[in-house]
Image (cartoon, helix red, strand yellow):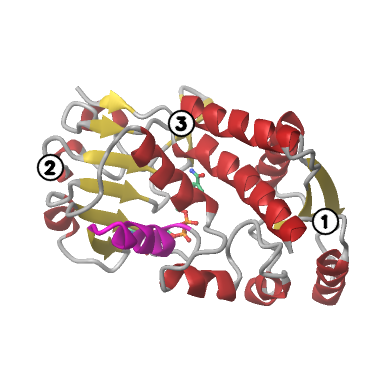
Amino acid sequence: MAQIIDGKIVSKLVKDNIKSIIESKKISPSLAVILVGNDPASLTYVRNKTKECLEVGISPKDYHLPEDTPEEKLLELIGNLNKDDDIDGILVQLPLPKHINTNKILNAISPYKDVDGFHPENVGKLMIGTPFVEPCTPKGVIRLLEHYGISVEGKRAVVLGRSNIVGKPMAIMLLHRNATVTICHSKTKDLSEITKQADILVSAIGIPNFVKADMIKKDAVVIDVGINKVEENGKSKLVGDVDFENVKEVASYITPVPGGVGPMTRAMLLENTVNLALFRRSC
Ligand code: NAD
């Protein structure tokens, strides 16, 4: 049976480290968190991020804007936050309402305050192997692999999903660590023939229980990024992309949902904020 990769334990270590850096360097980093509208999942994410900021000594500055906020207003706010010396990081909670062009907004955030690592300049730096800010979810996955002593070099890694925020940066980060990487997506043919070759499988597609035990090579490392809400016995609960109960019998390591990648994503956001705060103070 697979060893469980515990994101709660590893994220706690990361957060303890962040707290001690903040205390020893005597800094008080601040993170602007912008939410447009009232999407229930986004409200929960923002609440959790705010709470965790306070736990480690980061000051969250919340900007909750109405659903019908014009794009220009949001750009104006970001422009002001870019210039504000009291702000170290800017996070815009996605998804944004349909009338707002997400790329335009992400491009407007200063690359030096871009805690999510989504600005094209930071994406480019990651691509060429000189990262400045790395996106939180794939960074959290790499940290989990490192913590459990799982080597990536020379391994066959398969990433399910090709989004800009998870799949693509995940593949690049595994490639830079010398894995042989395949990216699969919604148009991939014979998907399970590919997944069966994976020494390390990362799933980020958003389909509950999609990855079954017969799609996995024996002793593979299985990382489940998916977060999916399902109804079970009249109650809603969160599950990943992986059929955890059966896949854990075949894999050597596996992340649970919840308690795997999710807490690491939030911890990496805090780490990115502190790193940007330290960088700005060193300039
Ligand atoms: P997305 O919707 O932007 O991308 C989904 C990807 O899955 C696409 O690239 C698509 O091609 C691929 N896909 C869809 N159906 C497929 C299929 N049948 N076979 C193979 N590939 C298929 O999603 P995203 O933003 O990358 O998020 C993916 C999942 O990860 C979601 O469940 C999301 O909630 C979750 N997520 C979790 C965290 C975390 O911290 N754990 C962070 C971000 C996203």
Q: Is 278 left, or right, of 217 in this rendering?
A: right
Residue 114: quarter of image: bottom right
Q: Mark 3 points at which residue?
A: 7
Amino acid marked by disc 1: Ile
Q: In which quarter of the image is the C terminus?
A: bottom right
Marks 1 & 3, CB-CB < 8 Å contact: no
Q: Where is residue 144 in the image (x, y as percent from the top left)?
A: 40, 38
Q: Mark 1 points at which residue?
A: 87
- Chain part drawn in magenta: 166-179
From the viewer's perspective, tell me whether residue 41 is left or right of residue 239.
right
- Residue placed at 87% from the left, 61% from the top? 85
Q: Name the residue under label 2.
A: 217
Residue under the image location 33 percent in, 41 percent down: 223
Above or below, 263 relative to 34 = above
> Is residue 37 in view?
no
Q: Which residue is drawn at 71% across and 32% down?
A: 56
The CB of the residue at mark 1 lies under 8 Å from ligand 1: no
Please give left or right for residue 126 compared with residue 241 in the image: right
Magenta segment main secondary structure = helix
Q: Is residue 167 magenta?
A: yes
Measured Cα–Cα span from mark 2 to mark 3: 23 Å
**Where ligand 1 lies, by quadrant?**
bottom left
Q: Indicate which disc, 1 or 3, sits on the residue closer to the N terminus.
A: 3
* Residue 112 placement: quadrant: bottom right
